[in-house]
Structures are given as C-alpha cells and as structure tokens.
Amino acid sequence: MTQIQKSTKEKSWYDLQEHPYFKAALNKVEHVKSFYDNMPVFPEITPRNLKGDSLKFDQLRDRKMIIVAIWSSKGRNSKMDLPVLLKKEAVLNKMEVQVVYLTDDEDYERWRKSNHLIGLGSNSYLLNVTDRDFIKNSYDVVSTPRYLLIDSKTRTIIELVGADPTLSDFMKKLKTKL
C-alpha cells in the first residue's frame, strides 16, 4: 500500500467518525451499553388483581427471583405460552421463584375473561395506564409475552428478555440465573 493510499484510508475513517450518523449510532450504542451495565431497579408499581389487591414486591423478598410475565389478552402467543408457564409454577415455587403476570391490556373485561380462561388467578395484575406506559417504554416491550427476570431482594433486573417457558431449556437457563 502506498503512502497516498494509506493516507486516504486514514482520512476516510476520520471523515466517517465525524459524520452525524456515525456519532448518533455511537451515542446509541453507549446509551444501550450504559443501560445494561447499570441495570435499573424495577419500579414500585400499583397494578391490581381481580380481587382488587395491589402488587407488593416487598412481600416477595423471601424468594430468590421474580419472573414478571408481561402479557396481553389480545396476543395469541400470550394465550399459548402462559398456560405452559403456569404448569411450571409448582417447580418454580420449589426453586423459590415467583411468577407475577402483568397485562398491558386496556380493556378490563377482556383481561378478566382471558385471565379466567388461562387460569392465572391472583398473581395476575392489570397495569394502570401510567405503569403500563412506563414499563413498555423503559423496558422496550414491543411484543408479548415478555419475561423479565428480577432479583427479589433488590428488584434489580437480572435479564430484560428472559427465557421462553415453552422451550425445553427454560428451566436450565433459569437455574443459571439463580
């Protein structure tokens, strides 16, 4: 490579680094890296279950982990996946893992009917508008179901996209996080 070719390559790399798109992409990468390096604490939220009870994370501190399953009664995948997770709850309880189901539904009746049909019970909560928007935007929930793994003592998010309970390696992946 000649000196001129080398100089031109260095100049073009420098020009690329100065381009606004390059700077914007670099900024986005740093933002995402910072987010994962400084994983946020799951917020104190106030959803209600069918009985009207609020979710109290402090009551789950004796568990090793919380799986927050964000679902929607409109979503076909939620209706297929959640019964599978529900069947695994007995084993999860022995592992000291608590499952909490949060719906992003806006329609109370549809949520109530789906909740009953799936059989989720009192660990299924309807998010209020503020909590729903915060969770969707803060944790990039664009599709459901979505499984967040949370440290029950600190409410620190362990994993933003937890393992899919319908896959055969779900329990194995979960055990590595405990």
Image: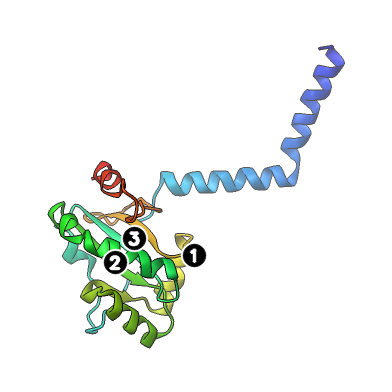
Query: In this rendering, does residue 43 appear at all?
Result: no
Q: Residue 130, can we see it?
A: yes
Q: In the drawing, what numbered circle is on residue 137? A: 1
Q: Nearer the viewer, mark 2 or mark 3?
A: 2
Question: Between 78 and 95, which is closer to the camera in this rendering?
Answer: 78
Q: Quadrant of residue 153?
A: bottom left
Q: CA distance from mark 3 to mark 1?
A: 13 Å
As shown in the figure, which amino acid type bears the numbered disc 3? Phe
Above or below, 94 against 130 in this view is above
SS for dot 3? loop
Q: Is residue 117 above or below residue 174?
A: below
Marks 1 and 2 sit apart, C-alpha to C-alpha, by 26 Å
Q: Are marks 2 and 3 in contact (CB under 8 Å)?
A: no
On screen, residue 37 versus residue 63, left or right, reads right
Amino acid type, residue under disc 2 in the picture: Pro
Residue 88 found in image quarter: bottom left
Q: Relative to residue 79, is residue 31 drawn left or right?
A: right
Residue at 39% x, 84% y: name it. Answer: 110
The picture places residue 33, in percent across and down from the top left corner, at: 49, 44
Any mark on residue 84, and which? none
For the view shown, which residue lies furthest in the top direction?
2
Q: Earlier in the sequence, mark 3 or mark 1?
A: 3
Q: Residues within 10 Å of mark 1 (few under 14, many from 20)?
A: few
The residue beneath circle 3 is: 42
The mark that comes first in sequence, 2 or 3, is 3
Residue 83's disc is 2
